[in-house]
Amino acid sequence: MNRKNNLLHIGWLILRVGIGISIFLHGLPKIMGGSETWEMVGATMSNFGIDSGHAFWGLIAALSETVGGLLFAMGLLFRPAAIMLTGTMVVAMITHLSMGDSFMVYGHALDLLIVFTGSILIGAGKYSIDTKLLPKIA
């Protein structure tokens, strides 16, 4: 492998791990917050006409961020993790937009939505667990 191609894979590794850990740390307080926090987070589903089961939806969002963030960072089950995180960012962005928040608020969710959507297409990269364990889907 040539030097330029290797740098590309190292760069993607740094981005993948950094974003994954960041989203994990963002979701960890949601997991630790318990059912009261899950209820609050899940209430955002009202933007989609879902007015019950908010604790369930909040738990799903918290798991998506914590477990999905770790999987994203490790490059393990990478595309399913990126799909989960993409969905979570869609909900986050729509929630901020429905509240009339400015770009300074919803822009972070939009940035991550773009990263996770692109990641689905890119894959985990050479330096990932998927490449070692599941080379045909990596």
Image (cartoon, grey):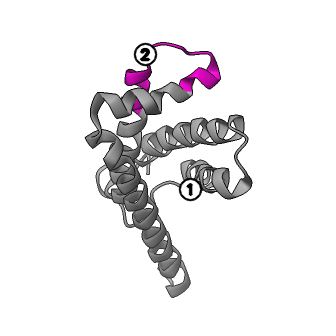
Query: Toward the viewer: 41 or 17?
Result: 41
Task: Name which residue type carries label 1.
Answer: Ile
Q: Which mark is residue 122?
A: 1
Asked which secondary structure carries label 2, the reply is loop
Above or below, comparing residue 63 to residue 39 in the picture: below
Q: Is 132 left or right of 110, judged from the image as shown?
A: left
Query: Toward the viewer: 44 or 62?
Result: 44
Above or below, comparing residue 17 to residue 93 in the picture: below
Is there CB contact under 8 Å for labels 1 and 2?
A: no
Mark with earlier residue (1, 2): 2
Task: Name which residue type carries label 2.
Answer: Gly
Q: Is 60 left or right of 3, judged from the image as shown?
A: left
Q: Which residue bears the numbered disc 2?
A: 53
Where is residue 78? Give x, y as percent.
42, 48
Look at the image and say whether residue 29 sits in the magenta stretch: no
Q: Is 10 left or right of 24, judged from the image as shown?
A: right
The residue segment tinted magenta is 45-60
Residue 43 shows in the view: yes
Where is residue 76? Give x, y as percent.
34, 50
